[in-house]
Image (spheres, rainbow, N blue to C red):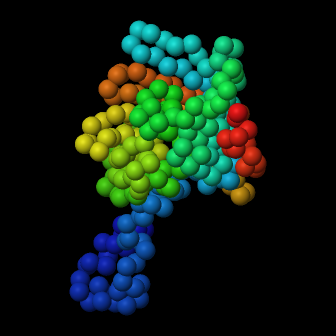
């Protein structure tokens, strides 16, 4: 219907004048979708804008022939804060990674106080994976629509994201969002100079309930380091939308 209407408006001058008079200039049927709205809506499928959400992650990392011991983590997130606690393996049990706004701290049993994670440290290791899995791209980046592309047989909006502030870990992101499903399928993370640092692919086998609607939620995330060649796979399960107290993200509680 949309394509017929858009083409029909340009059939001849008379019909065009009538169409503008009846339908109004800037007819929504012909308007391009808003890039920031697409980005904000896609954040929900990773926990953004839900008020509070909790899940478990099974994490496996490999670097060439070396395969790290699998980990299982419990994660809670609300607004711009998140807390990840290691459940397995036993030797890392109790280690926690806290993120509040754009600040991040690490603690583990035996440490007297949390260790702040610097912006440079956040570019590598599990801290960088946490940043990629973060829920609020719309809060940290301005989006611009750069056409559509097919990705694995699915039409996608291609969004170019530019960091709103220097606290953002990545200066630029290219993000593929499914036109039909409204979820992010692929992302590429770049430095200010344009060097590709990391890439990620997303799958959505989970479903959550929010405001009476069933929403797809991320079930698998594969993150590749473009510089080192390392790869991390995250499997998401036991997802629950629930209210999480602000005290859960209190740095003082970690000490």
Q: Residue at x 35, y 22 (%)?
A: 228
* Image quadrant where residue 70 sits: top right
Nearer the observer, 232 or 114? 114
Q: Determine if residue 182 is in view.
A: no
Q: Position of residue 112 (x, y in %)?
A: 67, 27
Question: For residue 77, what is the image quadrant?
Answer: top right
Image quarter of residue 83: top right
Q: Is residue 75 left or right of residue 139?
A: right
Q: Residue at x 36, y 53 (%)?
A: 162
Which residue ends up furthest to the front in the rendered image? 112
Q: In the shown orientation, is residue 55 left or right of residue 138?
A: right
Quadrant of the image containing the N terminus: bottom left
Viewer can see residue 58: yes
The image position of residue 195, as x and y in percent, is 27, 37
Q: Considering the image in quadrants, where does the C terminus appear?
A: top right
Percent position of residue 146, x then y = 31, 55
Q: Residue at x 41, y 88 (%)?
A: 22
């Amino acid at each position: 219907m949309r394509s017929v209407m858009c083409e029909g408006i340009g059939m001849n001058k008379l019909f065009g004048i009538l169409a503008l008079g009846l339908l109004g200039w800037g007819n929504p049927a012909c308007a391009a979708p808003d890039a920031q709205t697409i980005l904000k809506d896609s954040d929900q499928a990773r926990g953004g804008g839900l008020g509070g959400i909790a899940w478990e992650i099974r994490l496996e990392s490999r670097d060439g022939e070396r395969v790290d011991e699998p980990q299982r983590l419990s994660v809670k997130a609300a607004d711009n804060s998140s807390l990840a606690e290691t459940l397995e393996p036993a030797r890392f049990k109790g280690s926690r990674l806290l993120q509040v706004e754009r600040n991040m701290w690490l603690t583990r049993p035996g440490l007297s106080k949390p260790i702040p994670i610097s912006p440079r440290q956040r570019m590598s290791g599990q801290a960088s994976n946490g940043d990629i899995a973060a829920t609020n791209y719309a809060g940290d980046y301005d989006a611009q629509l750069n056409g559509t592309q097919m990705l694995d047989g699915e039409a996608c909006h291609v969004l170019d994201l530019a960091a709103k502030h220097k606290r953002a870990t990545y200066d630029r992101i290219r993000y593929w969002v499914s036109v039909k499903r409204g979820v992010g399928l692929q992302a590429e993370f770049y430095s200010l100079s344009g060097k590709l640092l990391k890439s990620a692919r997303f799958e959505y086998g989970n479903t959550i309930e929010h405001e009476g609607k069933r929403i797809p939620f991320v079930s698998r995330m594969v993150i590749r380091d473009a510089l080192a060649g390392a790869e991390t796979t995250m499997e998401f399960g036991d997802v629950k939308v629930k209210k999480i107290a602000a005290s859960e993200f209190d740095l003082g509680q970690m000490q």
